[in-house]
Amino acid sequence: MRAGSAFIYHCSEGQRGSLVAREFSDAEAAGCLQPRFIAVHANAVDPAVYSHWKSPGAIAWSPFSNLWLYGQTTDVPAARAQGISVCLGSDWAPSGTKQVLGELKSARLTADHLGWSLSDQDLVMMATCLPGDILTRAWARQIGRLQPGAQADIVVINAKRGVSAFPTIVQATEDDVDLVVISGQRRYGTAKLMSGASTATTLTVAGRPMQLSLSQPSEASKAWEWSEVIDRLEEVRAHPKREVDAANAMYARWAGRLDDREAPLRLALDMPTGLAPIGALPEDLNDLVIPPLQSLTHDDEWLDSIVGRGFHAGVLDGVGKYYRL
C-alpha cells in the first residue's frame, strides 16, 4: 500500500463481539489501516474502534447480506463520522442481492429502520463516486464520476422527464436499465441503443429482449456468446470434482507471477480459523454439489424467499415493494 497499491480485504464479517472482530485488530497491528485499505464488511467491528483508523480508507457495505446472516450491519454513521468512505456493493449470491440496484434498496430500508439520516444521494454516491475515488488512489485514473479523463462507465436508466435523479436511481429495477457502458464500450442495453455494437448477442432480462456484448477473455476481438457462458457454467456444475482437480493442477504448474494476466485463479477460503471442514471443500470432492444457476433479476421466486427467512426480522421484506408495484 505504501508503494501505491490498494488492499481489498474481506474483514470482520459477523456479529460484534465475535471472533472475526480480531481481523480488524490484526490489520491495525500490522500497520494496514492506511488510505488504500478497503475493508469488506467490517460489521463485527466495535464502532468505537473506527477512531483508530487515523488515515481513513474505505469500508465496502453489504446491508442485505449482513442482516440476512447476522441480524446486524456495519455502523455506517460511526464509520462516516471518522472520515471512512463507505461504499455499497452486493455480497455473493447465497446471501446477497443480484446486483447493486437491489443493494441500494436494501440500504434504503436498513437506514430507515435504524433511523440513520442517509439521503438517496448519499446512497447513490456510495455505489458510484465514493468507491471510484478510493480506487483512484491506487489506479491513478478516476472512475465513478462523469468528468474529463475519467473511465467512461455509465448506466442509462429510463425515467420520466423532470423526476428527481437520486430517488429514481434507488427505486430503479432491471427493466428500467436501458444501457450499460463500460470503459467507453457499450456492453448491455436495448437493441436500439446497442445498434452497431460489436459482438452483441440477445438474452431476455425482466421480460425484455436485451443485447449483451461480451468479448472472449483471451481474445478481445472475438465474441463470447451468452449461451457459451451458460454452457460452461453448467459443465462445471455437472462435473465439479473434475473442474476443481483441473484448476488445482493448473495452479500447481504455474511458474509465473500471480498478478500476470494469464495467471490461474487460486481458491483461498476465508473462514477465520482457516481450518477444514468449516467453510472448506468436502474431503471427497465427489460429494460437492453446486446449486442450479439463479435468475439474473430479483424475480418473484427470489423475493418470496426473503420473507420468513434469515435473521433480518422482516426489515428486508420491503425489497419486494420496489418490484411489485
Image (cartoon, rainbow, N blue to C red):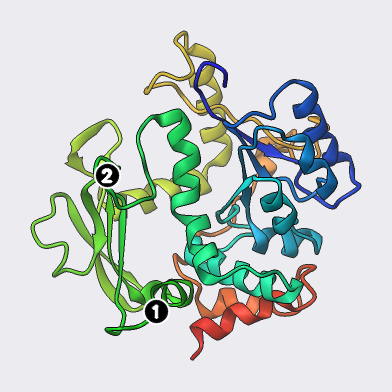
Secondary structure of residue under mark 1: loop
Image location (x, y in percent) of residue 279: 75, 41
The total of numbered circles placed on residues is 2
Q: Residue at x 51, y 23 (%)?
A: 5
Whether residue 99 is visible:
no
The residue carrying mark 1 is 164
74 relative to 261, above or below: below
What residue do we see at 47% from left, 32% from top? 137
For mark 2, what is the residue? 183
- Does residue 160 appear left or right of residue 37 in this picture? left
Q: Nearer the viewer, residue 157 or 271?
A: 157
Tell me if residue 41 comes above or below residue 108 in the rendering.
above
N-terminal of the pair, mark 2 or mark 1, is 1
Tell me the kind of residue under disc 2: Ser
Residue 93's disc is none
Q: Residue furthest bottom?
A: 325
Q: Residues within 10 Å of mark 1 (few under 14, many from 20)?
A: few
Q: Nearer the viewer, residue 192 or 27?
A: 27
| Spot occupied by residue 184 in the image (x, y as percentages of width and height) | 22, 47
Q: Residue at x 34, y 76 (%)?
A: 176
Asked whether the residues under the numbered discs 2 and 1 touch, taking CB atoms below 8 Å apart as contact, a structural biologist would say: no
**Picture residue at 37% right of the left edge, 22% below the top:** 262
Which quadrant is the N terminus positioned in? top right
Of labels 2 and 1, the one closer to you: 1
- Would residue 32 be seen by someone viewing this image from the given angle? yes
Tell me: residue 269, above or below residue 227: above
Residue 268 horizontal/vertical position (percent): 64, 30
Q: Residues within 10 Å of mark 2 (few under 14, many from 20)?
A: few
Residue extending farthest left: 196
Residue nearer the viewer, 191 or 61: 61
The CA span between labels 2 and 1 is 26 Å
